[in-house]
Image (cartoon, rainbow, N blue to C red):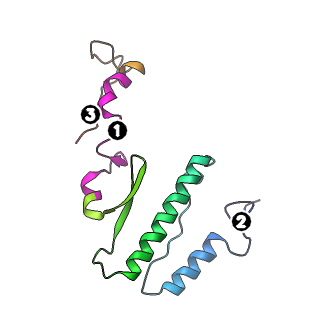
Amino acid sequence: MTSNHRSEKASKTYSTEVVTNILAEEGKELFDSRLVALGHTLQGGVPSPRDRTRAVRLTVKCIDWLEKQHTSNSEASAATIAIQGAGIRFVPLSEMLEAADFKNRRGKEQWWQPMQRLVDVLCGRLNLENKPIGSFVPTTTQA
């Protein structure tokens, strides 16, 4: 049996689709409303407590940002939220486009990049002489 809601504890009346439609109708020309399913749901896994905590932190930050935009005369009308280290910040879209590796769906600079050779050796992609093992050909992650 399939269901219209995403969780056994979700409202049967106010499904994701209904809320999306209400927001779209109320927003008219002011804003857009789109239906989005959590990536974990799409990937088949159950979100961990850390995933849930991060989602709440991101949601609170986004709502705060929207409230500040509503009460300010700022020209910044679009941004993306970014997790950098332990912090969360809003980044202008131009900065995000410059820092993003769209092909691999991550930032161009990763905290683990200085350890790439060690990772390759430990997982068997390279031997200690930096020669590929088997048919693996290492690719660089830096642009």
| Disc number lying in front (3 or 2) | 2
Q: In the displayed structure, would residue 21 be above or below residue 123?
A: below
**Residue type, mark 2 in image:** Ala
Dot placed on the residue nearer the N-terminal end, 3 or 1: 1
Q: Mark 1: which secondary structure? A: loop
**CA neighbours of label 2 inside 10 A, class few (<14), some (14 to 19), many (20+):** few
Q: CA distance from mark 3 to mark 2?
A: 44 Å
Please give left or right for residue 88 compared with residue 109 in the image: right
Q: Residues within 10 Å of mark 1 (few under 14, many from 20)?
A: few
Please report whichever mark, 3 or 2, sits nearer to the chain's N-terminal start.
2
Q: Amino acid at mark 1?
A: Trp
Report if residue 50 lies within the magenta region: no
Q: Are marks 3 and 2 in contact (CB under 8 Å)?
A: no
Question: Residue 60: where, in percent of width, then height?
Answer: 51, 65
Circle number at residue 127: none
Q: What residue does disc 1 label?
A: 111
Residue for point 31% across, 34% down: 113
Helix, strand or loop for disc 2 = loop
Q: Over which residues does the magenta segment extend?
A: 96-120
Proximity of marks 2 and 1: CB atoms separated by less than 8 Å: no
Q: Residues within 10 Å of mark 3 (few under 14, many from 20)?
A: few
Which label number is shown at residue 140? 3
Up-down: is 98 above or below 69?
Answer: above
Instruction: Check the image and report above or below for 139 versus 32.
Output: above
**Residues at marks 3 and 1, CA–CA distance in whole angstroms:** 14 Å
Q: Disc 3 on helix, strand or loop? A: loop
How many numbered callouts?
Answer: 3
> Residue 9: which quarter of the image?
bottom right
Residue at 75% across, 60% down: 8
Please tell me the numbered disc located at residue 10.
2
